[in-house]
């Protein structure tokens, strides 16, 4: 039996009014956040993932932070892998505003709605969140429409993805945390020209003095294990890489990642492991 | 009874040795054309830490913007067990002449105790392929053991090959469930390192003079000694630090004296009385 047509709860004008009121409230009580869409770069169709995702745009839009009493989730957590900040937050965004500001650019993977996997940077909380779930039907058809999205978010687990949004506070996440060695390559002035060599003004390649011999004698390009300042590191350990490359000494895993101990073990092993004889069954760290 | 302080850093050194096996794992990410777009070292850390220090180090200004950076490797000790199959006679002493400025001493310690220390190594990743790259760089080296040469006791100058045995691999991928739960890809590799624990090392002066009085008949009253044999190293001041190993063995000054008296050597006075 059909519903009574004289008691309709969702005429178009009513729905528009309801949506307008929501947008007005979100603009009064909401917060400015940056919606950062994910760009797929190298989708792995076998495992269903994309480890090279890029984040190259940020759209300023107002959203209401539902968590009035602070973040949900387990917050700061001590795990086997160090400090893990598991803050959860829910952002409410008006459907129409999202379409006006974000969707209009056709810049998201699925253009119809906010996407799981996209990021939200909340400047006031200074946190980068990943949308884990887009709740599209809360509130539930109050005037026969769905005017908002509730974006369930968790703090982003960063995996050295490229973040180039043009907003310094967001882009600094990549600069501070990315372990990509290629970002620390020594580049030449005209690196596009393949036959370009490293050349110095006076035509002599001067090397770091190793300190063990007299001035001007025995200078070397220092290896990764040396501690002298100004050294350069040569990396060519990745099988299949196009070529060896030189990386700057700014690439220190322990400095980029405060919890990492790679360099610590590299140094500590020198006094604990013995490399005086070749070990046919293993030479850790050699 | 037990309380003679000593600490040889044995377990600590095994932890460093174990960690150094995995501190250079590399990861590469390729684009759709198969070109390498990113390469990185995988961060490694010993897991257990003081919580307060971990937070102060990793989030000093309370402005950490992300949850955690991945992939990463953590490891921890999961147990210690006595290994009776490697036990040697406990009364045997390990001796080492001191060198350097203290070269007039002989250091010694009893036979070390064989122990197995179990490690759990955790590999956490955002993506399956990243985790597999890491795992596949580790597994081929363990057949099922990988050996590191450890300076086990600096005092006794003992260097030993320590096998690290890969026992098992566990895999966990929490991809099911509601969208509010994080997906966690964690490989857990269980290892056993076979090492030794050393007791206290004592030192005593090096024996530089030997003297023996020999008797042909040991009667109860006033036995007559017949011969005294004494030996000292040649040169007399030879020590581990000035002994020329290339010149061959050092020699001894040997002296034999003959007696027909009933005197006895008094080690206190150094006289025949």
Image (spheres, rainbow, N blue to C red):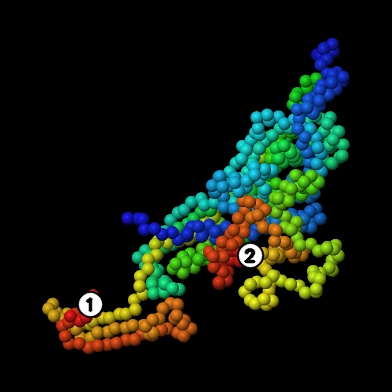
Question: Mark 2 packing: few (<14 Cα in 10 Å), some, or many (20+)?
Answer: few
> Residue B30, position in %: x, y?
76, 55
Task: Give the secondary structure at mark 1.
Answer: loop
Secondary structure beneath disc 2? loop
Q: Position of residue B31 (x, y in %)?
A: 79, 53
Residue B269: give its label.
Answer: 1
Residue A37: mark in rendering: none
Residue sitting at 32 percent across and 83 percent down? B231
Q: Is residue A24 above or below residue A48?
A: above
**Which residue appears farthest toward the left when viewing the image?**
B221
**Distance between the Cα atoms at labels 1 and 2?**
59 Å
Q: Can you say which quadrant of the picture contains the C terminus of chain A?
A: bottom right
Residue, x 78% and y 27% (percent of image)?
Answer: A28
- The residue that appears at 36% across and 55% down in the rendered structure is B3
Q: Chain of mark 2?
A: A
Tell me, yes or no, if residue A215 can be seen here.
Answer: yes
Q: Residue at x 83, y 24 (%)?
A: A20
Q: Which residue is mark 2?
A: A227
Q: Chain of mark 1?
A: B
Q: In the rendered view, would you say A233 is above or below B49? A: below
Residue toward you, A13 or A242: A13
Q: From the top left corner, tell me how far across and down residue A253 is, in percent.
A: 66, 56
- Label 1: how many residues lie within 10 Å, few (<14), some (14-19) or many (20+)? few
Quarter of the picture holding the N terminus of chain A: top right
């Amino acid at each position: 039996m059909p519903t009574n047509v004289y008691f309709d709860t969702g005429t178009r004008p009513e729905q528009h009014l309801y949506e307008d009121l929501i947008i007005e409230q979100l603009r009064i009580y909401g917060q400015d956040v940056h919606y950062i869409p994910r760009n797929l770069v190298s989708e792995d169709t076998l495992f269903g993932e994309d480890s090279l995702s890029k984040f190259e745009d940020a759209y300023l839009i107002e959203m209401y932070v539902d968590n009035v009493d602070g973040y949900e989730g387990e917050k700061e957590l001590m795990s086997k892998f160090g400090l893990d900040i598991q803050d959860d937050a829910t952002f409410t965004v008006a459907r129409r505003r999202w379409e006006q500001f974000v969707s209009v650019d056709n810049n998201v993977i699925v253009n119809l709605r906010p996407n799981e996997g996209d990021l939200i940077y909340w400047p006031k909380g200074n946190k980068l969140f990943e949308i884990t779930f887009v709740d599209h039907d809360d509130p539930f058809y109050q005037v026969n429409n769905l005017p908002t999205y509730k974006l369930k978010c968790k703090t982003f687990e960063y995996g050295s993805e490229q973040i180039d949004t043009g907003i310094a506070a967001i882009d600094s996440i990549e600069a501070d945390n990315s372990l990509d060695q290629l970002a620390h390559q020594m580049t030449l002035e005209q690196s596009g020209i393949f036959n370009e060599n490293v050349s110095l003004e006076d035509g002599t390649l001067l090397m770091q003095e190793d300190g063990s011999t007299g001035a001007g004698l025995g200078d070397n390009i220092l290896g990764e294990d040396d501690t002298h300042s100004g050294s350069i590191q040569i990396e060519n350990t990745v099988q299949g890489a196009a070529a060896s490359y030189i990386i700057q000494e700014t690439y220190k895993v322990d400095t980029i990642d405060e919890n990492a101990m790679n360099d610590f073990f590299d140094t500590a092993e020198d006094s604990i492991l013995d490399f005086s004889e070749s070990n046919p069954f293993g030479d850790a760290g050699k | 009874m037990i309380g003679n302080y000593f600490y040889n850093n044995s377990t600590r050194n095994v932890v460093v040795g174990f960690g150094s096996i995995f501190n250079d794992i590399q990861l590469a990410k390729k684009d759709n054309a198969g070109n390498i777009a990113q390469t990185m070292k995988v961060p490694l850390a010993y897991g257990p830490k003081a919580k307060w220090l971990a937070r102060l180090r990793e989030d000093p200004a309370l402005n950490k913007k992300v949850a955690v950076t991945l992939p990463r490797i953590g490891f921890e000790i999961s147990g210690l067990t006595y290994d009776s199959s490697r036990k040697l006679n406990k009364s045997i002493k390990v001796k080492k002449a001191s060198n350097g400025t203290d070269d007039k001493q002989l250091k010694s310690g009893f036979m070390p105790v064989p122990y197995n220390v179990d490690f759990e190594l955790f590999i956490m990743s955002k993506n399956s392929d990243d985790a597999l790259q890491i795992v596949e760089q580790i597994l081929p080296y363990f057949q099922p053991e990988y050996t590191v040469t450890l300076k086990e006791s600096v005092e006794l100058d003992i260097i030993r090959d320590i096998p690290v045995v890969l026992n098992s691999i566990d895999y966990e991928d929490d991809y099911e469930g509601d969208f509010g739960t994080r997906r966690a890809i964690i490989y857990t590799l269980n290892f056993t390192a076979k090492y030794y624990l050393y007791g206290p090392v004592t030192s005593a002066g090096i024996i530089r003079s030997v003297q023996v009085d020999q008797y042909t008949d040991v009667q109860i009253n006033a036995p007559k000694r017949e011969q005294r044999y004494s030996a000292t190293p040649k040169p007399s001041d030879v020590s581990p630090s000035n002994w020329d190993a290339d010149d061959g063995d050092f020699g001894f000054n040997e002296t034999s004296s003959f007696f027909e008296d009933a005197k006895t050597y008094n080690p206190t006075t150094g006289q025949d009385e």
